[in-house]
Amino acid sequence: MNPIVLTIIQIVVVLLIAPLSVGLTRFFKARFQGRHGAVPWLPYLTYATMLKKENVISSSGSWMLRATPYAVLGSALFLALVLPLVATGGVLAASSNFIVVAAVLALGSAFLVMGGLDTGSAFGGMGSSREMTIVSLLEPTIILTFAAFALATGSSAVDGMIAGSQMAGELLITAPYLSLSLLALMLVALAENARYPVDDEATHLELTMVREAMILDYSGPYLAMMEYAAALKFTVFALLVANFAMPTPLIMTSSTLLEVLLAIGATFVKLGVVMFAVALLESTIAKMRFYRVQEFLTGAFFMALTGLALALLSQLL
Amino acid sequence: MSMSTLAIALVISVVGTLVAGLVAFWPDPRAHRASNILLAVSAACGAIVGILIATGDGLLLVLPEALYPAAADGSAHVWPLFYGMVFGLDRFSAIFYSLMSVVTLLVAIYAIPYYEDHAETYSKPGANALTALFVLGMQGVLLSTNIFGFMTFWEIISVTSFFLIMAGGSIASRKAGFLFLIVTHLGAGAIMSGLFLLSGGALLSDFSVIALITPELPQATLYAALVLLLFGFGSKAGLVPFHVWLPEAYSEAPVPVSALMSGAGVNLTVYGFLRVLLFMLPGVPMWFVLTVVILGVISAMVGVLYAVLERDVKRLLAYASIETMGLIFAMIGVGLLAGQEGSTDLTQAALYAALFMVAAHALFMSGLFLASGIMIATVHSRRLEAMGGLAKRLPLFSGAVCVLALSAALMPPFAPFMAEWSFLQAVVGALTEATPMLKVALAVIMAAVGFVAGLALFAMVKLYAIGFLANPRSDEAAAAIEPKPIFMLPVVVLAALGLLLGLFSPLVLNRIGAVDLAPADLDMQVLATGGGELAPLTLFLVMAGILLALFLLRRLLSDVTFERNYQTWDCGQPTTPRMEYTATAFSAPIRYFFRFFLRAQKVVTSTPLTPNNPWVASRTMSLLVSQVWYDRLYAPIGSGLTRLSGLVGRLQNGSVQFYISLILLALLVTLIVAL
Amino acid sequence: MMTTFTSSEVTTISLAVSFLLCAFLGSGKFRLGQIVRYYALQSLFLAGLLISLAAYGDKHLYLSALGVIIFKVILIPAIISTNAKRSSASGRLTSFVRPAPSYFVSGGTLLLAVLAGMSIAPALQETDLILTVTAFAAMFLGGAMMAVRRDLYSQIIGFFTLENGIAILAAATLGAIPLLAEIGIFLTITIGALLMSVLSRRLKELYAVEDTGELRELVD
């Protein structure tokens, strides 16, 4: 199959299922908490409604306020295009170098932060300050985590890391120490996507917000873009973590039509499983006070460092 | 172009600079413009020569030979200018020469409106002449091929910067000037002694001759020279803990000078350091390389932490410069370390990444300093807390600064990111083959670079967001208007150059000799090292394509005109600028998380306005961030010196004749006893 | 052993001795006009010395001699006298010692200088030895003049005498120094003369003193 087709299939699938990720988590969480919960596909309707609503722009804001939704959604879209989520060996696979991925991730967050500050409200500033702290202190963890994967698989492109091990759980069986790195990646994913224990997407208390505080002043189509970007990023991380744990089945250039359908079906399953796990986590642990997030970040860092150290050690043996 | 044409252009660039310095004193109001334009033209000449030699294969320009083509019988008559001294440019120095010239060109353009607007603070002739002399010093350092020339011009740079830093005339700038003078002279002394140790005391022997004798040097001499050189170059580059002068000097100097010092001057330390290490020494011991790495990493981490905390825009940039220089020295150190441990791929990638970072740093740092000048001129304050709201009022300018800030934050697709990528990717690639010791070092380096990159983003977002976004925090900021085009032009050009240098980084790197890092068989569009590849142009096109698609989709899926302006939501109350997050508050989490190192002391004093209601009070907050090196390193040295000079002071009775007699006596005793 | 001198060597030696004599005589004079004239004369002999050296040595020294005449014989004395006149400085100079003892000081210094010169260059040929000794003698005479006198103008002249000594030493040992360095030195001392004269004029105007003894404390 043509690499271009692979990329197109992937981006279409990911774009289509992205809102489902948020919907599923909320659904599972409601069930855990004994509520009935909204249907999992509610976010589709929400986003469509937002697109039709009036766009209220803060009079304090500059062009940054308008640029932010594009940059944030663009960053998420870039990740959805280059990372191996549904297919490996796509046309942009070469751009999935882990340093580039980390940088684009940070770039999106930087714009989110600047957009939050541009409204001039204290809430936006608070959220921005917190988000910036989390993002900047996560940077070394991301680098070390991926470095361990790169060392074990011999590829610096995330695409290559996953394509190298096409058997279920192969990566973790041949290199069991990578489970630490995978755990670190999960912690990164939680922090990056405003999840427990770092942030709570469902909170209505501004003083505890991180991400929500930054997008308080967006409305209409811009809010739709921001929410959709968050959902997309969440989906990307969910599929990425799932693929590191179980890289098969993914669409490849050699795939038949049946395998393609199988892979797309598996994507839904993966997403469901991850969202179930996230909902379970969010229903069992408490959110951390922001000034304790340091412990979470330090923990993630040392987990990544240990993962890399073990990977280096295993080479000596 | 023939060698003699290049040589003539080079001479024009030097002589033009000198003439620009003289023209500054012409008693005519047009002298200011003439001097700066002449400086800009000379710099343009120098930039062209530099670029041609840097990208030409094995071109070597030697003055004065290139000016006097040999006669038919092979003899060339050359008037002995100075002990038969030879000046020249090879590829390595040409890289720095072209960078320096480009920055000078833009700074000279910027200086025209800057000094006109600040005529009551700075004397135009003085500032112009000193700036031209400063540039001449930089040219001389790069052109010199022996210790004498190198040190002479090095001192010209130091002395002119000293006067330029003090040009403001305030007490703070005088203090900064003297601090600079002390550190820079200690450094110059160290460099000179280090070089003399290497050359065996020869003043005028060519660098290539020194390279021949260094392998025979006794180990102790070599070690002493290395320590001296590291201190000399490191202190001038602002490596922690010798960096104390840098934030003071950069923030007190006139803006064009800060830009020139940070964008061109500081590069010379890297030049000098590498010139000695790579061209004059057979090899360096392991402890030295590790020291360089550790100093570099510590500088980068400390620099970036203080950049995050800083609230004065120029000091923030100064700390960001320390951070980048730290990264550069760390890269150099890793390159040398890898060379010792046999990872040659990493050596090349790391050294070229360091060089590329120098180039990127020159562009974004001078751009940011020039931009800070416009910000300061607009709000009449260096405090970020007095800014804000500029993006709305100065959209074009704010866009250029946004690009520069993202460059400085090591974001793709700008040039600094390409340097960071090359380095990190090479490190990851070298992990597999490396010796155990190198592996540990590389893992630590990776974590440190990640840390620095993350916090650099924090610092730059803070600079941009607090400085430009939201509502203006002062009346001056509220009244801001877009600056004059000529004021803005250099900033915009530097931002654009940073982007272009990033996009065409493989081409540039290949042309300056990094043939493994940017292989020619990949059309010079791909950086490839350590098993990874990066195509900057493709990356940029993908990003641009995504944004374009989003732009179109937004118009397709929603109604663009269906919108209105309304005040920011704040629980139903109107917002005021005083409610905005300040620079201090924005960086509070970092201050809290790193309190074990920063030991910031926040003191809030509240005085009730009415005696019976403690809640209505006026509060003032002061924040003191302690600096470990002052308390632990400089304070003891300082008090020791004061005690010593108290002892010496007993000798001094103020009579000139007494001093002269002492000198004579000393001379006489020396002559009779020592000889 | 008696050495026979060639005629050019005789010229050189006699010029050197005349130079030294001027320096010696100048060190005992207490009128500004006199010491400036002695300095000019001393520099003239220096120029002659350089020319005689150039005759059998480096032709480059002719240029140096020209420079000496322009700068040291004409320009510097002119600068100092003009400035002194403009500030209406008293022609009478002040010293810690009186004229007669000051000759003793100079004589003693001369002796020490000869001692130093002999100790530094025992292996030299006669002409070079005499030049070296002359150089050191001029340096010490200048230094002694600076140490003994109280007024600023004598400090200037003393310093320039010292500098002349260095010039002879350079010409005798190095042969010739490059043009650029030579020009640099000339410009430096000219500017030095200018600065010192202006300084003494300003002091005279502000504090009405010419005596460095009054300048012991820093004033804001």
Image (spheres, coloured by chain):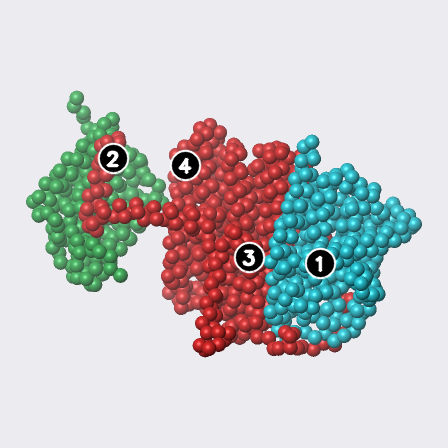
Read off the chain for label 4.
Answer: B
Read off the chain for label 2.
Answer: B
- The hue of chain C in the figure is green
Does residue A116 appear in the picture of this structure?
no
Residue C15 vertical placement versus B384 (above, below): above
Q: Tell me the residue that label 3 is attached to.
A: B592
- Packing grade of label 4 (10 A; few <14, some 14-19, many >=20) is some
Query: Alpha-carbon distance for marks 3 and 1?
Result: 22 Å
Residue type, label 1: Arg
Read off the chain for label 1.
Answer: A
Q: Tell me the residue that label 4 is attached to.
A: B196
Q: Tell me the residue that label 1 is attached to.
A: A195
Residue B213 placement (x, y as % from top left): 46, 30
Identify the disc placed on residue B4.
Answer: none
Query: Alpha-carbon distance for marks 1 and 4?
Result: 61 Å
Give whichever of discs 2 and 4 has the lower sequence position: 4
For the residue labelled by badge 4, is the local secondary structure a helix, a strand or a loop?
helix
For the residue labelled by badge 2, is the local secondary structure a helix, a strand or a loop?
helix
Q: In which quarter of the image is the C terminus of chain B?
A: top left
Q: The cyan chain is which one?
A: A
Left or right position of B272 against C73? right
Residue type, label 2: Thr
Q: Nearer the viewer, residue C24 or A122?
A: A122
Q: Tell me the residue that label 2 is attached to.
A: B670
Residue type, label 4: Phe
- Find the residue positioned furthest to the right: A258
For the residue labelled by badge 1, is the local secondary structure a helix, a strand or a loop?
loop
Query: Alpha-carbon distance for marks 2 and 4?
Result: 23 Å
Q: Which of marks 1 and 4 is in front?
A: 1
Q: Which residue is found at the position 68% from the left and 46% from the top?
A: A145
Residue A64 placement (x, y as % from top left): 64, 67
Give whichever of discs 4 and 3 has the lower sequence position: 4
